[in-house]
């Protein structure tokens, strides 16, 4: 696992321990700093185990994908942490994890509401009006056909190429580990795997798309707690036992085609 940051277990993180302050970048635009007290360190944590559906943590990340960049130096790694069931059982940690992340968003919302003139260039907005401008960390997911809410996700992303502080960039990779934190050389994270990640608040951004603001979460390491292929498989589908048929026969495994055997027209 990475040693560059002091990662804390997610259930030890509290929004009550966060401090926000207002600053400016080189162009004079407002910036927001978020740190943990009393250490005054960045917010970084180890997440609970969650199902990931769209991981891009290997190779070139999202470079070459349908919605990815054409420039490989702009490639990003990404991981989505969902509230999907594990082996047909609700994730016992996700509700508390989601509530904790939401409380961080709420504390940021209160800060921006109080400093809205400096941050948003607006005044007299209610808290709910400011909330409409916030990009929340825990995001709902809807069925594309019906529009029905089907779950929630927390997303994190990291640039494949990072600035080296001397005007250049260096290539980096996401570290893949097993459930015990041992590094897995050439490890792969696949859709449906149950994973935990080391995430950190890379930036509290403002001014995106006009007045939008929120927290950009990045990640360094992913532990594969259980591969999808090794999750408990179904042994019975009871719905098919409702009816009986006189012509039903026991299922026999088809014999493999012999080498060179072809289907004839």
Image (cartoon, rainbow, N blue to C red):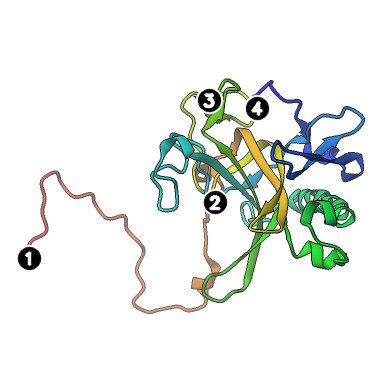
Q: CA distance from mark 4 to mark 2?
A: 22 Å
The residue at which mark 1 appears reads as 265
Q: Earlier in the sequence, mark 4 or mark 2?
A: 2
Q: Nearer the viewer, mark 4 or mark 2?
A: 2
Q: Label 2, secondary structure: give it.
A: loop
Numbered label attached to residue 184: 3
- Left or right, 263 with respect to 145, comes to left
Tell me if label 3 and label 2 are in contact, CB under 8 Å: no
Neighbor class of circle 3 (other Cα within 10 Å; few <14, some 14-19, many 20+) is: few
- Of residues 255 and 3, the one nearer the viewer is 3
Tally the marks: 4
- What is the spatial separation of the Cα atoms under label 1 and label 4, in whole angstroms? 54 Å
Residue 110 in the image, given as x and y percentages of width and height = 88, 54
Say whether marks 3 and 4 touch (CB < 8 Å).
no
Tell me the SS state at disc 4.
loop
* Residue 80 position within the rendered picture, expressed as x and y whole percent measured from the top left: 60, 48
Q: Would residue 90 be visible to someone looking at this image?
A: no
């Amino acid at each position: 696992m990475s040693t560059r940051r002091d990662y804390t277990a997610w259930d030890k993180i509290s929004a009550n321990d966060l401090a926000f302050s207002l600053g400016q970048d080189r162009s004079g635009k407002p910036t927001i700093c978020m740190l943990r007290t009393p250490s005054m360190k960045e917010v970084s944590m180890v997440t609970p185990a969650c199902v990931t559906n769209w991981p891009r943590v290997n190779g070139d990340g999202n470079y070459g994908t349908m919605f990815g960049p054409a420039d490989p130096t702009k490639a990003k790694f990404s991981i989505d942490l969902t509230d999907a069931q594990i082996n047909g059982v609700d994730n016992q940690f996700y509700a508390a994890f989601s509530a904790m992340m939401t409380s961080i968003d709420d504390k940021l919302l209160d800060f921006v509401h109080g400093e809205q003139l400096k941050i948003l260039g607006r005044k007299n907005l209610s808290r709910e009006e400011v909330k409409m401008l916030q990009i929340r960390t825990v995001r709902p997911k809807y069925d594309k056909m019906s529009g029905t809410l089907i779950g929630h996700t927390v997303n994190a992303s990291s640039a494949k190429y990072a600035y080296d502080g001397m005007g250049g960039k260096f290539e980096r990779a996401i570290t893949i580990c097993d459930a015990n934190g041992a590094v897995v050389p050439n490890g792969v994270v696949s859709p449906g795997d149950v994973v935990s990640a080391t995430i950190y608040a890379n930036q509290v951004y403002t001014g995106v798309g006009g007045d939008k603001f929120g927290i950009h979460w990045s990640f360094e390491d992913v532990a594969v707690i259980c591969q999808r292929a090794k999750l408990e498989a179904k042994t019975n589908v009871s719905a098919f036992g409702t009816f009986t048929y006189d012509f039903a026969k026991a299922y026999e495994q088809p014999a493999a085609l012999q080498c060179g055997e072809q289907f004839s027209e």
